[in-house]
Image: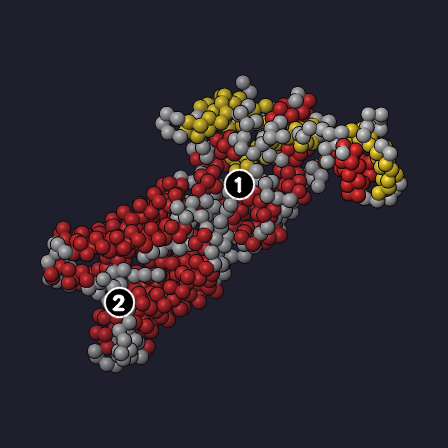
Amino acid sequence: MSTGAITLDGLAIGYRLSRRREKRIASDLRLRVDEGQFTVLLGPNGAGKSTLLRTVCGLQDPLEGRVLLSGRDLASLPARERARSLGVVLTERVDTWGLTVWDLVALGRAPHTRWSGRLTEQDRTAVATALAETDTEDFAGRKVSELSDGEKQRVLVARALAQEPAVLVLDEVTAFLDLARRVEIMQLLRRLAHTSGKTLLLSTHDLDLALRTADRLWLIDRRGEVYEGCPEDLVLAGSLAEVFRYEGLEYDPASGRVELNQPLGERVGVVGSGVPALWTQHALERLGFRVDREGGDAVVALVEVEGEEPYWRLHCRDHESCHSTLEDLTRELGSQLQTAVA
Amino acid sequence: MSEQSSSAPALEPETLQPRGVGTLPWVLLLGAVVLVLLLELALGVVWIPLRDVFSLLLGLESSVDRWHRIVLDFRLPRALTALIAGSALGVCGLLLQTTFRNPLADPWFFGLVHSARLGVALFVVISGSFGSTVLASLGLLSNLGLAISAGLGALAMTSVLLLLAPRVGAVTLLLSGLMLGQTASGLISVVMHFTTEAQSRAFTQWNDGTFVHVGFSQLGILVAIVALGFACSVLLAKPLNILLLGENYARTLGLAVERSRRATVAVAAVLAGAVTAFCGPVAFLGILAPHLARVLFRSADHRVLLPACALLGAGLATLADLIVHLPWSRHFLHLNAMLGLVGGPTVVLLLLRGYGSREAS
């Protein structure tokens, strides 16, 4: 058997409630992350992503099975050695009592330093490199408590990098960040995997971002089933739609989006082209209409989109009107259909 | 951001070596401690010129004969006790604050001091060694016994708090420590009920904290125990730094978290126990020193904070003792009252600034 950087060998995860009882989240996981790969663990909130990652980091004991790190059983690795090969970024808040960014990142060297924690030249270089790679050098002298969430997250990544591990495990690093920061962090991590050959396993519930960046996905659903593969294969196999079909949401492989799974309403034809027509369709779909871009016979209403500065012409049975905003248009459409019913 | 830009980034000198603490705060702090120490030796009911204090310390004669006795026999042991006890309590406070991740932690608030006194009370009753003599004339063995039983008492309290800590918040832990401390005080009264009158009189002598009653023989034991405690603290500096990140991160950095925590609170208990055994309950130094150290040195690194807390604790204790022993015409000031004047508002300030609402995990 060829060993990846991380191998789950018949792993069962969950919590032991008492000696006899346990809450099992997933069983018999046989998964792999290869060296230098950027793997994203994707699943809805509450599916057990954190539990799986905590087990992979050794923060939680598996109920059964083993986690192998470069072929060696995690449970039998000495703590210091484990720390040298596995770096972790967790969701928990770090309360740092006035620690500076540099000092925090330098704590990543702990598994490499001697009893006093004194840094050698090599340690300092590793810290500086980690700061440079995460683009956090500019605030190296600032206190961690003064940073924004995005900056703090990058500093925590830098701390894990300073550890110089072959494997990085990151739990929901993009949560609580705005879109730009999320993309930035994911780009950074992906670059790390591809340029420095580090093995990355990251969890997220952000489907869109995962699909755009991951080399491979581990897809976990609420029953503890895990599917693995390259993102596109999982989409085509319907696994993604399967996992995210819950609570009125539906993953649509055609649009690549999770849609509100509400019963589709009446057909409305949209005639026109370009960006305005696209957003007209968006607005109508958001309101629950089914959009027919051909403008066929079965429609209850027809919307013509015209001009560079778009305006909309609405045809609904006998009614005909012109609108300069989509808000006006949809309001009029709603009232026309209401009177038709009455 | 292209993914091909893999060339190693050029490293700035500042990112290789951050701006350190610098020597200025150390010089200032050390100077202040020395100054307070000299004043402690010079000032009192009898004012002795600094020139004479110096010559006495150097083993020379002073201009007035009885000053020899005042400075070397009365004030010097008191000053040294204040220095050592103060530094021990300052370090003890820092150890507790980091281990419990609780900025309000302090040997007095957390009940270590009271449980240490309970240990002493039990030792006194069981050994019956007090007799009618005052504390200063006790033999070496009894003194050691006092320190050990006080340390065991404090250790019992820290063990209880370690069990409570993961389940409660910072303020709840503080209140639990305070209340358990009161319980220990109550138990001391009960224990005292079973002693002879002479024993209980000797014991009530240090119901209040003071550095007055410690002679040179006890000072030796105190120095030995505190030195041992400091040596262990130095070994704990790295684990304490790692613990700043929280339990989970500490574990992923390869730290044996439980073992480090137990070792730290054991050292804290030994320090608090030794001081309490000889000086009685001394308040507030354990919470003041660490917070002042963080402000003064702008650092969270325990390799800086440990010596800083020792110096600050020593200086504060000596300063408070100095003020207590100034020739006041009407009042008799107590050491804890002086410390409370600064310590009380400081704790309230910390609470108002929201330190208490942090998680205690």
Q: Where is residue A308 in the image (x, y as percent from the top left)?
A: 88, 42
Q: In which quarter of the image is the N terminus of chain B?
A: top right
Q: Residue furthest right?
A: A307
Q: From where the camera sits, is residue B190 visible?
A: yes
Q: Label 2 lies in what chain?
A: B
Q: SS at mark 2?
A: helix
Q: Residue A91 has which mark?
A: 1
Q: Residue B85 has which mark?
A: none
Q: How many marks?
A: 2
Which is more toward the observer, A174 or A45?
A45
Q: Position of residue B338 (x, y in %)?
A: 33, 68
Q: From where the camera sits, is residue B224 visible?
A: no
Q: SS at mark 1?
A: loop
Q: Position of residue B181 (x, y in %)?
A: 28, 54
For the point 39% across and 43% down, the residue is B166
Q: Within 10 Å of the Cα at label 2, are there few (<14), some (14-19), or many (20+) other Cα atoms?
A: many
A259 vs B287: above or below: above
Which is more toward the observer, A167 or B355?
B355
Which residue position is annotated with label 2?
Answer: B78
Q: Where is residue B52 in the image (x, y as percent from the top left)?
A: 29, 78
Q: Residue furthest bottom?
A: B63
